[in-house]
Image (tube, rainbow, N blue to C red):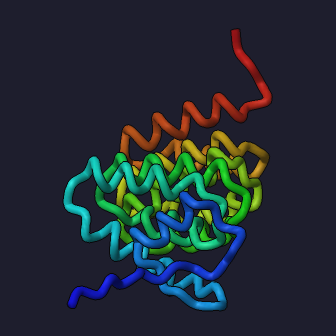
Amino acid sequence: MIKFLRRSQPEDPGLSEQSLQLYEVLRVPNTKELDIPAITRAVLRKIEILQNKQKKTKLLKTIAPLRLPWVPAVLLELLSDPCEEIRDIVVKELTARDDWPIQKAYEKLSRPPWFVKSSALRILSLKKCTDAVRHIKLVLEDPNVDVRRSAAGALGEIGGQEARVLLVGMAKDKNLYVRKAAQEALEKVSDLKFS
């Protein structure tokens, strides 16, 4: 005798049919209370299983625009995906959202690998978070050139007196690419315009 087993579905009647199908595909735990860490782990496991970049990207593009409370947590964790295309999607989506604490991006600045830091800096620059300048200051001596270059770009987008002071220091960096990024950023935030 064959039994048909029904996969568990979240007990939230407010979810759309598409969300319910997604929960089923992702095998999201069925609990009465929303356990964001458990859902995040389940979704990340499903994404990690996918070896095909196109399938992974398609799943991410399906999840990213959903306005569910666990989505920002998943996106933040995906900043550490080695695939640049995945990180680009995540940066775009997190920049467009206001339903997650920006402090989570600040935390990413202190964690390796370098591309997580660079992605977090891109988010901060696109969001133009003035509070971020003091956090960006902590990565100005990072050993990775791309992190320092991204920091200069972020400071140039954010602007302000403190950013200008930091950029003047970065214009003396030992790396040519960092110096160039700092000089371009200084031109953006400079009060004086030359013609």
Residue 148 visible in the shown view? no
Which picture quadrant has residue 70? bottom right
Quadrant in which residue 194 is drawn: top right
> Is residue 8 among what the camera can see?
yes
Judge whether 181 appears above or below 128 on screen. Answer: above
Closer to us: 164 or 37: 37
Nearer to me, 186 or 70: 70
Question: In the shown orientation, is residue 97 left or right of residue 170?
Answer: right
Vertical placement of 42 versus 128: above or below?
below
Q: Is residue 71 shown left or right of residue 116?
A: right
Q: Pinpoint residue 152: horizontal percent, then vertical percent.
A: 55, 46
Q: Residue at x 37, y 49 (%)?
A: 58
Q: Is residue 145 left or right of residue 183?
A: left
Q: Nearer the viewer, residue 183 or 88?
A: 88
Q: Quadrant of the N terminus?
A: bottom left
Residue lying furthest front in this view? 1
Q: Residue at x 37, y 45 (%)?
A: 175
Instruction: Judge whether 190 appears above or below 165 on screen.
Output: above
Q: Residue at x 35, y 46 (%)?
A: 85
106 above or below 120?
below
Quadrant position of the C terminus in the picture: top right
